[in-house]
Image (spheres, rainbow, N blue to C red):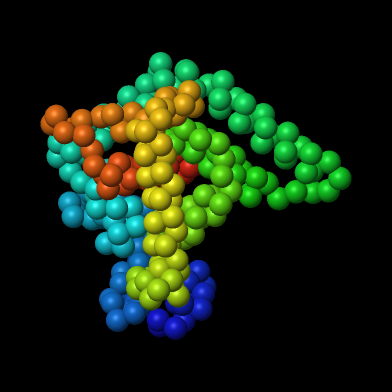
Amino acid sequence: ESLEFAQDPAAFHFRRLAKYGPIYKSNVLFSSIVHVSSPQAVAHLFRSQHNVGWPPHFFTLLGKHSMSAINGDAHRFQRGLAGQVLSDANTTALIPALQEITMCHMDELVSASTDCMVDPFLALKRFTFAIGQRVVIGSDLDDSLLDCFQQWTAGLGTVVHFELGGLTTFGRAMQARQRILDVILDRVETMNRDGATDKEQAAMLHKIVSAKFEGIGMDAARICDFALVMLFAAHDTTLA
């Protein structure tokens, strides 16, 4: 079953869905797995079980200090930071920048589709990442950073969670994660040394660099994990 699943996960699922119905058991990579695709069954599962959550490799990719991986006061503190950046006043201040980004990307799409049909998927990916990058980091779209972001998010759907020096999708995702963190750390160091630019002052990263939890500033690892998850959330929400 592992080989069949690796060859085509979707076909693997739909064949069993047709044969067994919305709930079935299989064995993939030496692990017994129950597949549930019934909305009613999923709702019942979440209502009756309190330890249901993301698989462990999600936290490896998102970071152990990310909002998704922590609880209690630290989680509430990070949610509060996100809320400050997404307050009415701050989002109103961002509107001109977001309008500029939107018009720029719409013009690109119109230009590209003048003489031929264009698949808008990649254009929309670039647009949504540009929004996320401006809101979270405070910088303009970097296509190389988008490539890293797509490699990183590809690791979330993997079933083989060994890095093997970048030979696996998960390994490449972890390498891409580090490249994104390097960019975030470079921005933090530049802000600390030279001060924040006008773009950066309205961004989430600038807010968390100066934030304090229980009187202590967030260290580099926590800043990076927070910014990375917010970048994911900004892109995911905008794309939806």
Q: Position of residue 72 (x, y in %)?
A: 14, 39
Q: Relative to the observer, which residue lies in front, 187 or 19? A: 187
Asked whether residue 122 appears in the rendered view, the answer is yes
**Which image quarter is the N terminus in?**
bottom left
Query: What residue is shown at x 45% (from left), y 75% (from top)?
Result: 167
Query: What residue is shown at x 27% (from left), y 62% (from top)?
Result: 56
- Residue 160, compared with residue 43, is above or below; it is below
Q: Where is residue 27 in the image (x, y as percent from the top left)?
A: 33, 79
Left or right relative to 23: residue 12: right
Question: In the rendered image, which quarter is residue 202 located in?
Answer: top left
Q: Position of residue 37 (x, y in %)?
A: 39, 60
Asked whether residue 41 appears in the rendered view, the answer is no
Q: Relative to the observer, which residue lies in front, 16 or 158? A: 158
Which residue ends up furthest to the right in the rendered image?
A: 115
Query: What residue is shown at x 40% (from left), y 73% (from top)?
Result: 165
Query: What residue is shown at x 46% (from left), y 44% (from top)?
Result: 236
- Residue 208, compared with residue 122, is above or below; it is above
Left or right relative to 225: residue 142: right
Which residue ends up furthest to the front in the rendered image?
A: 193
Q: Position of residue 92 (x, y in %)?
A: 47, 18
Q: How many labels does the image show?
A: 0
Q: Relative to the observer, which residue lies in front, 40 or 57? A: 57
